[in-house]
Amino acid sequence: MNINLTLLLEMVVFAVFVWFTMKFVWTPITHALAARKEQIADGLAAADRGVHAQELAKEKQYSALKLNPTIQTPLLETG
């Protein structure tokens, strides 16, 4: 077989492979990556909300203890 014909056929096969990959493989992968990115962002936002809610609960607990000094809890002093 002629080297030029072989090279031409390899280029055609590669072009078909690139087209197939972009049409049928690349799109689902990019959609999956976008969905995963959104899921991670939602998880990080939920974690931030949880930390904020925990800080608010701790402040509320300390303020409740300041209003009622008869309650003695040594667990509040740790951490």
Image: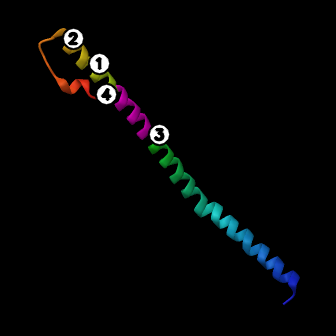
Label 4, residues with CA under 10 Å away: few <14, some 14-19, many ≥20: few
Kindly identify the residue that appears in the image at 23 percent across and 19 percent down: 61
The reply to whether discs 2 and 4 touch (Cβ–Cβ < 8 Å) is: no
> Mark 3 sits on what residue?
41
Q: Quadrant where the N terminus lies?
A: bottom right
* Residue type beneath disc 1: Glu
In this picture, residue 62 sits left or right of residue 21? left
48 to 29, vertically: above or below: above
In this picture, residue 64 sits left or right of residue 17? left
| Distance from the alpha carbon under mark 2 to that under mark 4 | 18 Å
Q: Quadrant where the C terminus lies?
A: top left
Task: Point out the tag, 2 or 3, that comes first from the N-terminus.
Answer: 3
> Mark 1 sits on what residue?
59
Task: Point out the tag, 4 or 3, that comes first from the N-terminus.
Answer: 3
Q: Secondary structure at mark 4?
A: helix
Check if residue 49 falls in the magenta segment.
yes
Region rendered in magenta: 41-52
* Image location of residue 66, percent across then percent down: 21, 11
| Distance from the alpha carbon under mark 4 to that under mark 1 | 9 Å
> Mark 4 sits on what residue?
54
Q: Nearer the viewer, mark 4 or mark 3?
A: 4
The reply to whether discs 4 and 3 touch (Cβ–Cβ < 8 Å) is: no
> Mark 2 sits on what residue?
66
* Image location of residue 24, percent across then percent down: 59, 63
* Residue type beneath disc 2: Lys
Q: Quadrant of residue 21?
A: bottom right
Task: Point out the tag, 2 or 1, that comes first from the N-terminus.
Answer: 1
Task: Point out the tag, 1 or 3, that comes first from the N-terminus.
Answer: 3
Q: Nearer the viewer, mark 2 or mark 1?
A: 2
